[in-house]
Amino acid sequence: MNEERSTMPWFGMDIGGSLCKLVYFEPKDTTKDELESEIEVLKNIRRYLTKNSAYGKTGHRDTHLQMDNVVIRGRKGTLHFIRFPTSEMGNFLALARMKGMANLVTTVCATGGGAYKFEENFIREVNMKLAKFDEFDSLIKGMHYIEAQNSDECYYWANPTDETRCAKVNYDFSNPYPFLIVNIGSGVSVLSVNGPNNYKRVSGTSIGGGTFLGLCCLLTGCNSFEEAIELATGGDHTHVDKLVRDIYGGDYERFGLPGDLVASSFSACCSFGQMNSRDRRSKVSREDLAKATLVTITNNIGSIARMCAQQEKIDRVLFIGNFLRVNPIAMKLLAYAMDYWSKGTMKALFLEHEGYFGAVGCLLQFNE
Ligand code: ADP
């Protein structure tokens, strides 16, 4: 058995501020000899990871994202995508220990701030060394790799404001440069990418997915991202926001501002009075508040993205990160905003494996 085949680590981890993303590569071209010599612990771990789609109370495998027949450093196999809240790291390590991980001498590729924060815990609790990689290098490498393997990876939203005609459309991203990445995680980073190894971080904002979830929980009493999105889906932000037409009675034509544009988030006034009156607040539903929070955060990110694209003279903007998970409202808003405010010159693009590129990228970089 050659050295490369036996020592290859199968995990890539991206330990973020909110979620830990774990990518597991399961080789499918294992020879009979390899299978026989594989130790029991490894077999058990593989079985556990690939037979379940839920791990403990909070771990999930995104089976719809699974990729079969992919090749990583000459090996053919399946990529599995698993996530759990970073706050559950203690339980994750306890589970890994219970499954016998500490008996393997392994190195795991890791990126994200948690690769530094939890480094000691990994060594102490599961005898695992972390091979640390830069998160933006990993993100871009992972993105290019997945995009090249999956012809359906990249898409845009056609007719984003028309519920009946709105559709996801495949986008050929084989000739990508230059493009902008807007990574919406707990916070937001904006990268300008001009070539495979040529990128810079041009901007960012602390008002991101974490802000949405935090504010939404505070305002509505909801307890999870999924619940927040569900509430927002049934809400109407115009009950909460002050629109251009609330001020002008219609469009502000001279500067091309349509009447239904939000002029001031969370400050609606109408026959009930203002948002700062107790009576007015009592008329607003949890759903409306969730939707207004989502619209406020998303429009702010869209506005920053457009200004960065303009400054960098780039017309394709790739939005990624787990804020976009199960979140078509935000994607459609971004698609519309980019198109409308750039007068059709900029395009918002999206990727199916939205939050997993950092984890994939650091797995690919091991021993590079
Ligand atoms: P990070 O690396 O900062 O954790 P991610 O790209 O993983 O960033 O995105 C985190 C964001 O994704 C959260 O702030 C939240 O808005 C959203 N999100 C999507 N699904 C979940 C979930 N199941 N639990 C918590 N946050 C989620």
Image (tube, rainbow, N blue to C red):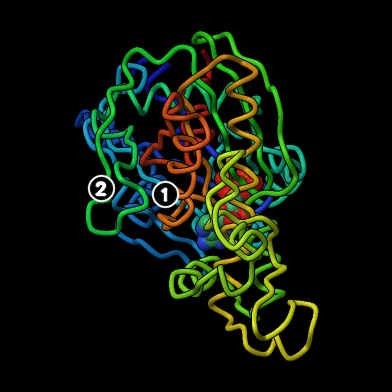
The correct choice, above or below, for 180 with respect to 233 in the image is above
The correct choice, above or below, for 235 with respect to 4 in the image is below
The kind of residue on which mark 1 rests is Lys
Q: Residue 144: horizontal and vertical position, in percent?
A: 41, 21
Give me the residue at 54% from left, 23% from top: 180
Locate residue 338 relative to residue 281 in the image: left or right: left
Which callout, 1 or 2, points at the residue further toward the start of the chain?
2
Locate residue 86 relative to residue 43 in the image: left or right: right
The kind of residue on which mark 2 rests is Ala
Quadrant of the rendered image containing residue 295 = bottom right
Locate residue 29 relative to residue 348 in the image: left or right: left
Locate residue 281 relative to residue 253 in the image: left or right: right
Give me the residue at 66% from left, 40% from top: 188
**Which numbered circle lies on residue 332?**
1
Q: CA distance from mark 1 to mark 2?
A: 10 Å
Give me the residue at 56% from left, 25% from top: 138
- Please state the total of marks drawn on the protein image: 2
Give me the residue at 52% from left, 49% from top: 322
Disc 2 target residue: 167
Contact? badges 1 and 2 (CB < 8 Å): no
Q: Residue 114: horizontal and vertical position, in percent?
A: 70, 43
Crowd rating for badge 1 (residues with CA inside 10 Å; few <14, some 14–19, many 20+): many
Kindly tell me whether residue 19 is visible in this rendering: no
Seen from the viewer's position, the closer of residues 81 and 154 is 154
Seen from the viewer's position, the closer of residues 255 and 316 is 255
